[in-house]
Amino acid sequence: MYVPPPFMVSYSITTKCNLKCKHCYSDSVEQAAPDELLTTEAFQLIDDLSGWGIGLLIIDGGEPLCRDDLLEILSYASSKGIRTTIGSNGTLIDRAMAGKLLDVGVMAVAISVDGADDRTHDSFRGMDGAFQQTLKGIEACRSAGLPFQLNMIIRKDTMSQLPAMLQLAVDCGANAAEFFDLVASGRAGEECQDQLLSLGERKQAMEWLADAQEDSPIIIRVPGCPMYPLLLQRKDIQPRHFPKDMLRRVPYYDRGCAAGMPMGYVMVLSNGEVNPCMLLQVRLGNIREEGIISIWENSPVLAELRRRDLLTGECGDCSYKVACSGCRGRAYEEAGDMMAADPGCWLAAELTEESKKRLEMLESE
């Protein structure tokens, strides 16, 4: 059965990384996995994607710059007309590499920054000096004219740094700030339990980011929290520096969780395994055994995931179950069921209270 393609596909090209990040969703290590897709297999994946009609290919890892054939694969994707970006920790990007990335057609780089200072970033990324090296990578991209955004994790230790982190993104010339709501999948499930936000903290962070968007010269996106765009709408945020319609580029805006959804998102691991999302690590198949389009259209897991009427608990009862639907990755990791209520949603209780008040008003009339 035909299902419209995802807008975005990410391909984790390698498990090899030069850092040891506590939250790594791909459990990256110092050495590449022995079963990573060969260059020719990566080309076959790109061939399949090129005729599918996706909007964006993100090549990440691990650290993609740790793979020797990265530029060859990027060049091949660009030659097939695919809008291609990479996700990097930035420490291996110098002026020469930034130029090479531009030459092979990379549209932009998403650079991870996990704190507003050396101590906060380095302790989370597992290497002293990483923050300064990342800043050098950012400057190399800026000097070369390679567009970039900053990807930042919201966790307990960075709650107080959100204003400084956003300002860092603005000051260094990023075209967007992407604040990831930390979900306990991958290595984060083992090493970051103490960094997960409480409901109150999540609400506080999202309220602040939504308010900050009004005067921010760059767009703020928040993967992992489908409740965020609801706040933008409920607050009627009016950005002063760009058209309001650009807010529709925020993940989940009017569409809910993107995992495995048409015009949403799907990911391919370094060994060809396919998951709905980096946060929803449920096996759908392997492109070595079945093409990605066939997996996308025929997976029973995806068929279930796409039915919002199958959501249970508070998400199933919520009036925003289509526009929001909660984070399916967090539901899976914390409740063991990808269709369960998102335990990270603070809006459900507020909506229930609002419904009670409306009912009381009706009964009193």
Image: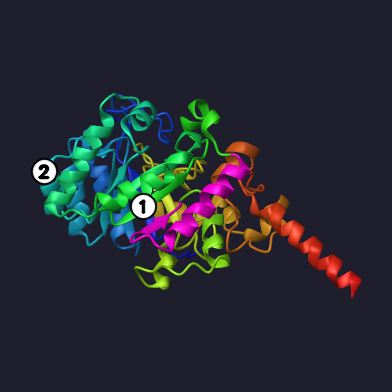
Kind of residue indicated by mark 2: Arg
Question: Residue 166, image x and y in percent?
Answer: 37, 49
Q: Quadrant of the C terminus?
A: bottom right
Task: Rate crowding at label 1 as few (under 14), some (14 to 19) or many (20 or more) other CA atoms within 10 Å.
Answer: many
Q: Secondary structure at mark 1?
A: strand
- Asked whether 270 or 292 is in front, the reply is 270
Question: Residue 167, image x and y in percent?
Answer: 34, 49
What residue is rendered at 27% in x and 51% in y? 171
Magenta-highlighted residues? 198-222
Residue 28 appears in the figure: no
Task: Residue 212: say if magenta.
Answer: yes
Q: Which mark is residue 95?
A: 2
What residue is rendered at 53% in x and 69% in y? 236
Closer to the eye: label 2 or 1: 1
The residue beneath circle 1 is 177
Question: Residue 127, image x and y in percent?
Answer: 30, 24
Task: Rate crowding at label 2 as few (under 14), some (14 to 19) or many (20 or more) other CA atoms within 10 Å.
Answer: some
- The main secondary structure of the magenta stretch is helix
Pointer 2 or 1: first along the chain: 2
Question: Residue 319, image x and y in percent?
Answer: 68, 64
What residue is rendered at 86% in x and 66% in y? 360
- Asked whether 1 or 225 is in front, the reply is 225
- Asked whether 118 or 39 is in front, the reply is 118
The quadrant holding residue 273 is top left
Of all residues, the one furthest to the right in this rendering is 364
How many numbered marks are there? 2
Kind of residue indicated by mark 1: Ala
Q: Secondary structure at mark 2?
A: helix
Q: Which mark is residue 199?
A: none
Task: Residue 192: say if magenta.
Answer: no
